[in-house]
Image (cartoon, helix red, strand yellow):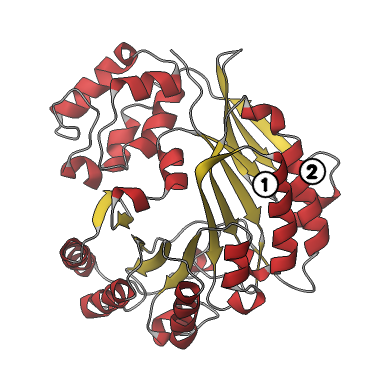
Amino acid sequence: MLKLPPLSLYIHFPWCVKKCPYCDFNSHPIKNKIPAKEYIDALIRDLISHLDALQDRKIISIFLGGGTPSAFSSTEMARLFEFIFKNIPLEDQVEITIEANPGTIEHGNFSEYKDMGINRVSLGVQSFQNDKLKSLGRIHDNAQVETAINNLTTAGFHNFNIDIMHGLPSQTVEDALYDLQKAIDFNPTHLSWYQLTLEPNTKFYAFPPTLPDEDTLYEIERQGKTLLDNSGFSQYEISAYSKSPETQAKHNLNYWLFGDYIGIGAGAHGKLTDIKNKTIMRIWKHRHPKQYLSQPKYIQGFETITEDEIPYEFMINALRLNQGITQDVFENRTGISIKNIAKPLAMARSKSLLLPSNVIQTTKLGKRYLNDLTTLFSPS
């Protein structure tokens, strides 16, 4: 039976100082001055247009992503949060995360972010080695990284994530473990540790750098996971590690468990459940900032996820989690009986991609061949 899932809010800030060669996100280099006031005004109007989607729910998490949200002044950001706190119902323990780039954090003060209600920071470090940062096209250096981390902890942010990439151009196992140990030494509550991939429509895809071979990548992952485990970090998703269940990323967990989310801002996507009509819909906004700001309505398109598409849409994210997915979660979030996916479940278990239990839980082999596993649930 279809039930209303938890609801999150994603806010997209599409500008950055420089487009990184590996980035396929909707981000645009700053050429002149950011139209900050106009954009914040548009975000507020965009959010107002989605108030009906609340359906008596409170927001469990807010994520400010980009681009580079920290390129916006604290004054403009505070105006957005003033509206949110006055007009949007929030859970008492709402998680509010801002992505910050160590190279732009001078535009926003961590203490001011804390004062306006933000309670979690995700810092895009990627590496602590200047040569690796340069190869990734990052605008910051290691000194700025360390300053940013010290500043956020001094401001009182005890719940923060550090983003670290591995499999970088010309990276050795020792390089990767050095970066990981440096991140651990700063005592974050959460780490996102993931492999660099060459995505279409990026500079790296068109002009591929020399990346580590498969044997090196295997050793990086094997030794890195051992280091994380020995340092008190538990892996709960393919690239996510936390110090405790309480510091797992609520916002990302809601994505992975097929929760609902409102997406506002240029190119933002949303997923919303309509209990009355028993439908699940995806919505996306105009992608380019100029187009987004010039349109009377911000929605570029929407579509209803068909019943035969829903199991795949659910599994493509939920199977990334280490925890098992119960029958109730699947049925309540999708409105589909578990019996409808009995055949692909049985096939996945016969191939040792899922554990032979009452919950839907990926094996180590299933994690390794996740694309093959999720394909079993795709429409025929």
Q: Secondary structure at mark 2?
A: helix
Residue at horizontal 55 percent and vertical 60 percent from the top: 98
Residue 19 visible somewhere in the drawing: no
Earlier residue among tags 2 and 1: 2
Quadrant containing the C terminus is top left
| Pick the front one: 146 or 282 | 146
Rendered view: 181 above or below 358? below
Disc 2 to disc 1, C-alpha distance: 15 Å
Image spot of residue 274 (x, y percent): 59, 20
Tell me which corner region of the image, top left, top right, bottom left or bottom right, holds residue 325: top left
Q: Secondary structure at mark 1?
A: helix
Tell me which corner region of the image, top left, top right, bottom left or bottom right, holds residue 28: bottom right
Q: Amino acid at mark 1?
A: Phe
Image spot of residue 147 (x, y percent): 48, 83
Q: How many marks?
A: 2
The answer to whether mark 2 and mark 1 are in CB contact below 8 A is no
Residue at horizontal 54 percent and vertical 71 percent from the top: 101
Q: Nearer the viewer, mark 2 or mark 1?
A: 1
Residue at horizontal 64 percent and vertical 72 percent from the top: 108
Rendered view: 300 above or below 202? above
Image spot of residue 267 (x, y percent): 66, 48
Q: Residues within 10 Å of mark 2 (few under 14, many from 20)?
A: some
Image spot of residue 142 (x, y percent): 43, 85
Q: Amino acid at mark 2?
A: Arg
- Asked whether, in this view, residue 152 is left or right of residue 322, the answer is right
Quadrant containing the N terminus is top left
Tell me which corner region of the image, top left, top right, bottom left or bottom right, holds residue 174: bottom left
| Pick the front one: 326 or 94 | 94
Mark 1 highlights which residue? 85
Mark 2 highlights which residue? 45
